[in-house]
Image (spheres, rainbow, N blue to C red):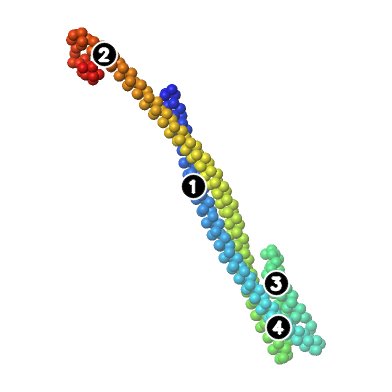
Amino acid sequence: MLNELIEKRKKILAESEQHKNRRNELNANASKFARERNTLNNQTREYVEEAQKNKELRDKFNNDVQSLKDQRNEINEQANALFEEIEGFKKDHGGMKNRGLKELQKQIEHLEFRQQTEVISTDKERELIEKIKQMKESMREQEAELEQNKEVKVKVTTARELRRQASEMHAKVTEMAELAQKHHDMMVDFYRKADKSREEADVSHRNFVEAQEAADAEHKYFIACQKELRDYDKVISGLRKKTKKAKVSKEQKAVRKEAEHLFKMFRAGEKLTTDDILLLQRSKLI
């Protein structure tokens, strides 16, 4: 029975080692997944922060665009008022050709707005730029004709200066709009990266939870094996003590029997050896 218990204990010990090794392996995996998750979460926060920075810059440039547009529109209104006065002068002086400076200015503004806002091919954009150039040249020709009159010349000069200012404003509007679009694209890109790293962090977290739960289960099995080993140790230790005690008792009986035999020989006057006498003394027969 003792040998059978010892063999069973060996099997439980081997099983305990397997659970311990598996637990340690799973804990190592859980730690790895936790580090990955934490790194990805930090990366996500950085992406979101960059996205927010670009959002703020986009909003700032969009506000700048709106402010510049308001200024440009106000300047254009002033220029248009002068063009109306010039048109009135042309009507009062029928000898001058009525080519519609105000209408030309509106067309130029419309084409410049298209150039700024529409997505067109390079060839189409060249055509648009060339058309704007031709219309501006036509305006300059008409302005040159009108400048023969001093009063009209002042208005044309003022309108031309206002148009130049409006053109500068338009260039700034285009610049600010491009910057706003640039930061909008960067914002979207960072948000996409944040979404991707957040998804990867979620996967790492799920892997961490699974590994941790599996490690906890292996640890419970290990603890159960350890308890079973202690139980086996108690039983085996008890059996060994009992076996040892029985063996000692058996040996003592054999010695006693031998001593009694020697004592009979002693009483009969037979010669005993020194060892025989010592045995009788240990048995307290003499």
Which residue is denoted by mark 3 in the rendering?
A: 113
Say if mark 1 contacts mark 4, CB within 8 Å.
Answer: no
Which residue is denoted by mark 2 in the rendering?
A: 260
Q: Is residue 134 left or right of residue 280?
A: right
Give the residue displayed 52% in from the left and 48% down from the top. Answer: 33
* Nearer to me, 279 or 78: 279
Q: Tell me which corner region of the image, top left, top right, bottom left or bottom right, holds residue 161.
A: bottom right
Alpha-carbon neighbours of circle 3 within 10 Å: few (<14), some, or many (≥20)? few
Distance Cα–Cα, label 4 vs label 3:
18 Å
Earlier in the chain: of badge 4 and badge 3, it is: 4
Q: Nearer the viewer, mark 1 or mark 4?
A: 1
Give the residue displayed 78% in from the left and 86% down from the top. Answer: 88
Q: Nearer the viewer, mark 1 or mark 3?
A: 1
Distance Cα–Cα, label 2 vs label 4:
144 Å
Earlier in the chain: of badge 3 and badge 2, it is: 3
Identify residue type, mark 1: Ser
SS assignment at label 1:
helix
Identify residue type, mark 2: Glu
